[in-house]
Image: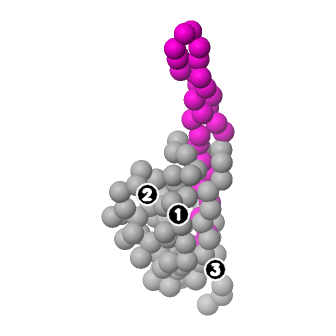
Amino acid sequence: MSELTHTVKLSNLNIAPRKVRVVVDRIRGKNVAQALDLLHFMTKLGAGPVAKLLDSAIANVRQQGDVDVDALVVQSVYVGEARTLKRWTPRAQGRATQILKRTSHVTLVIGA
C-alpha cells in the first residue's frame, strides 16, 4: 500500500483561533479513532466542528478506495486566522470601544 495523505479545510469558523488551537493541539499525531474519542468527550466549543471535519476526512479517504481506516493518523492540523469582524460597543461618557470578533481557518491532514 502506498503512502496516502488527505487534506481537508474548514473556512471561516466563528470561533477565535486561540480557542480552536487548544482543541487541535490535543489530537495532533494521534490515531483517528483516538482523536475522535478525545473530541467527542471534550467540553470545548471548538471540539464539535473539528470532530465533524475529521469525520469528513475519514469519509473522503474511504471513498478513494482500499484503505485501512484503523491505520490512519492525524499527521498535521493547524489553525489560521480568518477575517475579523469589527464591532463597536458603547462605553461611559459617550465613548465607544472596538470589539474584534475573530474567526478561524482549520486545516487537517490525515494519512496512513
Identify the residue shown where x is 59% and y is 23%. 97
Highlighted magenta segment, given as a residue range: 83-110
Q: Are marks 1 and 3 in contact (CB under 8 Å)?
A: no
Q: Which of the two labelled residues, at mark 2 and mark 3, occupies the earlier sequence position?
A: 3
What element does badge 3 sit on? loop
Question: Where is residue 94 shown, x and y percent of the image?
Answer: 56, 9
Check residue 84 for magenta coloring: yes
* Quadrant in the picture for residue 107: bottom right
Callout 2: few (<14), some (14-19), or many (20+) C-alpha neighbours within 10 Å? many
Identify the residue shown where x is 61% and y is 57%. 79
Report whether residue 65 is seen: no
Q: Which of the two labelled residues, at mark 1 and mark 2, occupies the earlier sequence position?
A: 1
Q: Main secondary structure of the magenta part?
A: strand
Q: Residue furthest top?
A: 94
Question: Where is residue 23 shown, x and y percent of the image?
Answer: 48, 61
- Identify the residue position indicated by label 1 in the image: 24
Residue 43, disc: none
- Identify the residue position indicated by label 2 in the image: 47
Amino acid type at image mark 1: Val
* Quadrant in the picture for residue 9: bottom right
Report whether residue 29 is seen: yes
Amino acid type at image mark 2: Ala
Q: Nearer the viewer, mark 1 or mark 3?
A: 1
Q: Nearer the viewer, residue 98 or 63?
A: 98
